[in-house]
């Protein structure tokens, strides 16, 4: 079956309000964005991220995935220009659109955009080990598990394990265009 189609563009201020109700609890916010964030997610937290997306070598890129004209996905890449490393983070599919196979085509295009810049050699990510849908998606894109930081996150009274995954430029297979050529 062909992958559902997702168009990727820059995530801008116009999308901020739409993403705020995607995470219903502290656990959901942290699963998405890590322990530095608080619940409820508010515009100020997203705007602080957007403030890092400017300049010649921004600290972060923020992307929106659109399906049928609706905001279907969000992802960020924290950019380490010195080492040529990006950290894929804050990946989410709109909760009203999950389970439809949108995550893989969305992130495939996000990774494609990242590796289009020759300054970068490695894309890495952190994922909580219980997050099966995320792990399946990352593995399907070619990410390899590199280790687990056991008991590394404190969320309320719970502690979560964080797995580290990496994907090198030499391991990345770009998607083909309509004519079957690598994009
Ligand atoms: C992780 C996330 C982006 C995946 O998107 P999705 O729309 O739910 O998943 P998809 O429909 O694209 O399916 C992706 C894979 O996960 C599997 N999957 C989907 N929901 C699942 C679930 N609840 N439990 C286990 N596996 C699941 C699918 O079968 C598919 O695997 P396959 O390709 O091997 O068949 C989405 O669930 C999400 O936004 N989660 C909340 C935020 C989050 O956890 N972000 C990741 C931070 S690291």
Image (spheres, grey):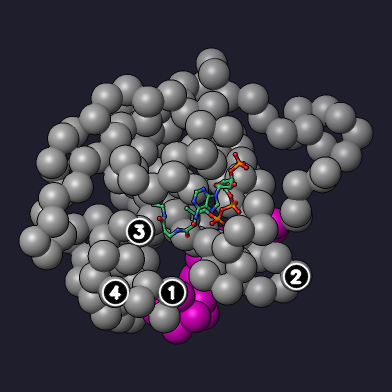
Looking at the rendering, the stretch of residues picked out in magenta corresponds to 6-20
Pointers 2 and 4 in contact (C-beta within 8 Å): no
Residue 28 is covered by the magenta coloring: no
Instruction: Report the residue at 32% width, 66% height from top.
Output: 28
Disc on res. 32: 3
Residue 148 picture quarter: top left
Relative vertical location of residue 40 with respect to residue 153 in this rendering, above or below = below
Pointers 1 and 3 in contact (C-beta within 8 Å): yes
Lower sequence index among marks 2 and 4: 4
Give x and y (percent) for residue 87: 36, 40
Return the residue nearer the eye: 168 or 50. Answer: 168
Between the C-alphas of marks 1 and 2, the distance is 18 Å
Residue 113 picture quarter: top right
Q: Residues within 10 Å of mark 3 (few under 14, many from 20)?
A: some
Answer left or right for 2 relative to 30. Answer: right
Give x and y (percent) for residue 183: 74, 34
Query: Circle 1 sits on which residue?
Result: 22
Lower sequence index among marks 1 and 3: 1
Residue 16 is covered by the magenta coloring: yes
Answer left or right for 148 relative to 86. Answer: left
């Amino acid at each position: 079956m062909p992958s559902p189609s997702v168009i990727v563009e820059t995530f801008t201020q116009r999308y901020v309000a739409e993403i705020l109700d995607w995470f219903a609890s502290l656990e959901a916010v942290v699963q998405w964005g890590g322990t530095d964030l608080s619940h409820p997610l508010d515009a100020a937290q997203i705007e602080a991220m957007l403030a890092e997306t400017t300049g010649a070598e921004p600290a972060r890129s923020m992307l929106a995935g659109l399906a049928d004209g609706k905001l279907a996905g969000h992802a960020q890449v924290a950019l380490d220009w010195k080492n040529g490393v990006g950290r894929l983070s804050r990946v989410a599919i709109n909760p009203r659109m999950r389970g439809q196979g949108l995550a893989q085509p969305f992130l495939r295009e996000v990774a494609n955009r990242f590796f289009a810049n020759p300054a970068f050699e490695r894309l890495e990510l952190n994922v909580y080990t219980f997050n099966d849908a995320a792990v399946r998606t990352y593995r399907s894109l070619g990410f390899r598990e590199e280790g687990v930081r056991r008991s590394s996150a404190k969320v309320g009274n719970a502690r979560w394990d964080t797995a580290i995954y990496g994907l090198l430029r030499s391991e990345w297979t770009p998607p083909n265009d309509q004519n079957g050529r690598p994009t």
